[in-house]
Amino acid sequence: MRNDGPPPGQADRTTRSDDFSARIAHDFLVRLRERQPRVHAITNAVAKNFTANMLLAAGAVPSMTIVADEVADFTRHADALLVNLGTLDTERRAAIPLAIAAAQDAAVPWLLDPVFVERSPRRLAVAQQLLSRKPNVLRTNATEFAALTRRPADRKSAMAFARESGCVVALTGATDIVTDGRRTIAIANGHGLMARITAMGCAATAVVAACVAVGDDALLATASGLALVGIAGEMAGEKAGGPGTFPPLLLDALHALDEPTIAARLRCE
Ligand SMILES: Nc1ncnc2c1ncn2[C@@H]1O[C@H](COP(=O)(O)OP(=O)(O)OP(=O)(O)O)[C@@H](O)[C@H]1O
Ligand SMILES: Cc1ncsc1CCO
Ligand SMILES: [Mg+2]
């Protein structure tokens, strides 16, 4: 996965909303369904089942083993690797460096979801060490971004951090900011219920990983993944009675997503 910048002379260009479009997000969805990329997700114990189902609903194929003598083989033959720190137990802690080494060896893109880095200095140190290994994408919520980067969680800091680290940064919340330091896309889709169920961000990062696996441009892949999840989320939210009925409706909406729906609903600023 290359993360080249724009041509010389356009270094500080901000992507206009018409540079990212429903057509691009739909192209990623078509590629997911055609290519069925394999995402190896080292994710947390809370998020596993929902994440696997979200990947399948998007068209991708999940695997999740964390066993030390298998994780490198699974990763080498995957199309993307997700590293999520949510339940950083001994087995996951051992698996993560093995998986990242295998991913880098096999040119498999990898993504970091630094769950709860603000809660423990030990976890923060692990996340900072992992960041130094240059994930293709860092996807965080605002609290995690502020702890990890010691900067305010805003668009300007996300851009500066992306530029300095060389990662695409996705700072999620009611509006998702996606930036590679030069181009920035803000996606306003989603629904309040997405913040009322567990592991929504974890699963969203997994869908982003699937998009990164099928595209050359990690910025557009990340924006597309979050747009697809956000649009499916708002459709599910409109039908759901509450957080109990929301997750299956989200899976149904993601599975059924089509071009006219994306075109009608995408809101990017
Ligand atoms: N209030 C909201 N309105 C609309 N969409 C939201 C809202 N809050 C979160 N989302 C969406 O939910 C998804 C997850 O983002 P969020 O920032 O909540 O992740 P997170 O805090 O890491 O979640 P978790 O750690 O529980 O998995 C994103 O696609 C985001 O756009
Ligand atoms: C609740 C919870 N605890 C560890 S990971 C996780 C899922 C949300 O990130
Ligand atoms: Mg999270």
Image: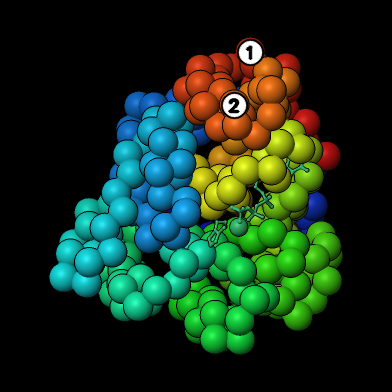
- Visual colour scheme: rainbow
User: Splitting the image into four quadrants, where does ligand 3 fall?
Assistant: bottom right
Q: Is residue 102 above or below residue 28?
A: below
Q: Left or right of 64: which side holds 69?
A: left
Q: Of the residues shown, which amino acid type is indicated by label 1?
A: Pro
Label 1, label 2: how far apart the Cα atoms are: 25 Å
Q: Residue at x 64, y 61 (%)?
A: 140
Q: Residue furthest top?
A: 260
Q: Is residue 197 above or below residue 117?
A: above
The image quarter in which residue 214 lies: top left
From the image, tell me which residue sits under label 1. Answer: 260
Identify the element where label 2 is drawn: loop
Percent position of residue 24, x then y: 59, 31
Q: Is residue 244 above or below residue 157?
A: above
Percent position of residue 219, x then y: 60, 51
Q: Left or right of 115: which side holds 190?
A: right
Identify the element where label 1 is drawn: helix
Percent position of residue 43, x then y: 42, 58
From the image, tell me which residue sits under label 2. Answer: 245
Q: Of the two numbered discs 1 and 2 on the same chain, state the one appearing first in sequence.
A: 2
Q: How many marks?
A: 2
